[in-house]
Image (tube, grey):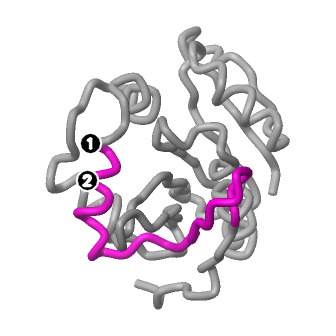
Amino acid sequence: MADYPAELVRNRFLFDGSPVTIRPIRADDKPLEQDFIHHLSADSRYKRFMSTLNELAPGKLKYLTEIDYVRHLALVAIIQRDGQDVEIGVARYVAGPNGDDCEFAIAIDDEWQGSGVAGILMLTLIDAAKARGMKKMEAVILSSNDKMIKFARQLGFDVRRDPDDPGMMRAVRSL
């Protein structure tokens, strides 16, 4: 496992001026990640995981937080609320078998959608993927997820219907 990439920690401001810290996820973030998933609406959980889960099983939680920072990188957006860290978004990529392409996923707390946090997370993730040798990034998106389709297009992804599954869209971008 690579060392924690402290160079990816960013302090930014959302559209309303709220401060947010973007940083790579850590293994000790399991409670933070589980709380984040609990706080998502059922619709947001479904759009992210394409299933109706209420919480992450221990193995899935471990997979999402114990990462190598090269082939699997996750960035979390953290705000302070009553002196405590609160996760309001997460974006991640996982490299494919060749090691030079990756699939991304993103989830934003419903309360923070439209705040600018998704763009900050994804631009940081794209830069990190390029720096780690990724040449292509892609995602599978539910065809009913209009907000995500629009967002991917705004980030320069080519979004097309999946020829094998009409209920899915494929977003692809060269890095």
In the rendered image of this protein, does residue 97 appear above or below residue 56?
below
In the rendered image of this protein, does residue 78 appear above or below residue 23?
above
Give the residue type that dot 1 points to.
Answer: His
In the image, 25 versus 12, the foreground residue is: 12
In the rendered image of this protein, does residue 134 appear above or below residue 37?
below
Span colored in magenta: 13-37
In the rendered image of this protein, does residue 106 appear above or below residue 86?
above
**Residue 1, picture quadrant:** bottom left
Q: Which residue position holds label 2?
A: 34
Give the residue type that dot 2 points to.
Answer: Gln
- Would you say 23 lies left or right of 58 here? right
Dividing the image into 4 quarters, which one contains the C terminus?
bottom right
Q: Which residue position holds label 1?
A: 38
Mark 2 crowd level (few <14, some 14–19, many ≥20, 10 Å Cα): some
Look at the numbered disc 2 and give the secondary structure of its residue: helix
Mark 2 in CB contact with mark 1 (< 8 angstroms) = yes
Instruction: State yes or no: residue 22 in magenta.
Output: yes
Q: Which mark is residue 73?
A: none
**3D distance between C-alphas at marks 2 and 1:** 6 Å
Identified at 58% across, 9% down, the residue is 166
In the image, 175 versus 22, the foreground residue is: 22
Identified at 65% across, 76% down, the residue is 10
Q: Residue furthest front?
A: 82
**Residue 151, picture quadrant:** top right
Identified at 74% across, 58% down, the residue is 123
Q: Position of residue 91 (x, y in %)?
A: 54, 54
Q: Position of residue 165 (x, y in %)?
A: 54, 13
Instruction: State yes or no: residue 138 in magenta.
Output: no
- Residue 174: tell me if it is visible: yes
Identified at 22% across, 46% down, the residue is 56
- Would you say 171 lies left or right of 82 here? right
Look at the numbered disc 1 and give the secondary structure of its residue: helix
